[in-house]
Image (spheres, rainbow, N blue to C red):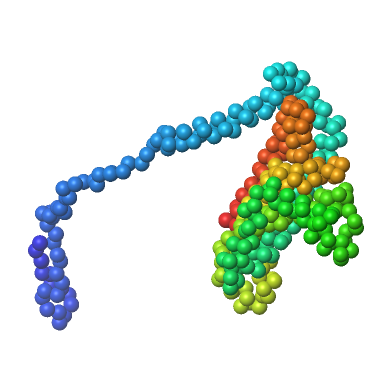
Amino acid sequence: MTDTVLSDQSIPGQSQGLFRVRQITDNVEARPVPSIATEPKLNPPASRAYFFGLMAPAIALLACISLYPFCWLIYMSLHDVEIGSAVWNNFENFTKLASDSRYLNGWWLLIQYSVMCLALQIGIGVFLAVALNGARFEKILVTTLLMPMMMAPIVAGLVWYFLYNGTFGWYHWLLQSVGILGPKSILASTGTALIGIVIVDVWQWTPLITLITLAGLKRVPQDQLEANMVDGASQVRNFFAITLPNLYPVLVIAVMLRFMDNFRFIDSVLALTGGGPGNATKILPVYLFEVSFKFFKLGRGAAIALTLLVVTIILGMILVRVFDRQQTRKA
C-alpha cells in the first residue's frame, strides 16, 4: 500500500502534506484456511425407529397385560358367560342396567362417598401441609404422618372394624361417652355406616394429599410472598393470593389420583361392612364384586365394570383438560 500526498492550495497557511489518501492495492493476502473444514459428528442423532425399538419390549408387555383383558371384558359384556360357554345376548347386560335399582343406588352411593372423601382429604391435607412446611421437626412429623398410608387397605379396614366394635371398640366407647352414638355401632346404622368408611379412607389417604401439597409448597416463589407482605398483605391473604394458585396444579393431580382410587378400592369397605347394613354402603365397586364373584354373573359384571371404566376415563379427561387450561392461562 502506498500513500499519496495531496495539498490544498485554496486554504492559506496550510502546509503541504496535510491530507493523505491511502490507496489499497489488489494484492490482499487471503485468510488462512483450516486444514479440517468441518468437525466430525461423533454422535449422530438417533432415529425414531431406534427409540421405538428400545420401547418395543415394554409396549408389548403392557399390551399383553392391559389390551387382552380389556378386549375380553368387552366380549364378556356382550354375552351370557357360563363356565366353558358364552352366548350372545343382544346387549341385554347393558339394557338391564337402566332398570337395576341396586346399580343406580351404587352410583349414587359412590358419588357421595367420593365427594366426602375428596373434600375432607383436600381440606385436611392442605391444612397439614401448610402447618408442617418449615416446621422444626418436619421430616420426623412427615414420616410419622405417612404410616397409615403404608398400611394395606384390608388391614386398615380390620383395625378400624375393631375400633368401631360396639362391644369393645375404643372409638365406639369414646363417641358413646360424648353422646354422639347410641348403643348401636357406627357401622350397624344405615345413617352412619357410610360416614364410618369415609373416616377410614380419610385417615389412610390424607397423608398422600399432604405429601403432594408439601412438595408443591416447596416450589412457591418466595419473592412473590415477600413482595406481597411488603405491600401489607396478611398471611391469610398471602395464602389465597399467592400460595393457593401455585398449588393448583398439584392439587388437580392429587384429586385425580384419589378419585380414581375411590372408584376401584373396595378392600376396606368389604372388611368393615361388606356393603351393609342392607345396601347402605354398597357402592358400585362392591356391587360389581358381588355380581361377578358371589353370584358368578360374569357377563353382567363385565357390563358394570365397563360402564365404571368409561366414566372414570371421562372424568380423568375432564380433570386433565382443566389442568391444561389452567397452565395455558398461566403461560
x and y percent of residue 313 in the render?
A: 67, 39
Residue at the extreme left: 2
Q: Tell me if 240 is positioned left or right of 183 in this view.
A: left
x and y percent of residue 30 in the render?
A: 14, 53
Is residue 252 in sight in this rendering?
no
Q: Nearer the viewer, residue 290 or 256?
A: 290
Q: Residue at x 64, y 30 (%)?
A: 70
Q: Residue at x 69, y 47 (%)?
A: 154
Which quarter of the figure is the C terminus placed in?
A: bottom right
- State whether residue 89 is above or below residue 114: above
Which quarter of the figure is the N terminus placed in?
A: bottom left
- State whether residue 9 is above or below residue 268: below
Q: Residue at x 37, y 39 (%)?
A: 46
x and y percent of residue 306 in the render?
A: 71, 32
Instruction: Report the label total.
Output: 0
Q: Nearer the viewer, residue 313 or 292?
A: 292
x and y percent of residue 208 in the render?
A: 64, 55
Residue at the extreme bottom: 13
Q: Nearer the viewer, residue 313 or 202?
A: 202
Q: Tell me if 226 is positioned left or right of 108 in this view.
A: left
Is residue 149 in sight in this rendering?
yes
- State whether residue 307 is above or below residue 90: below
Q: Quadrant of residue 45?
A: top left
Q: Nearer the viewer, residue 149 or 94?
A: 149
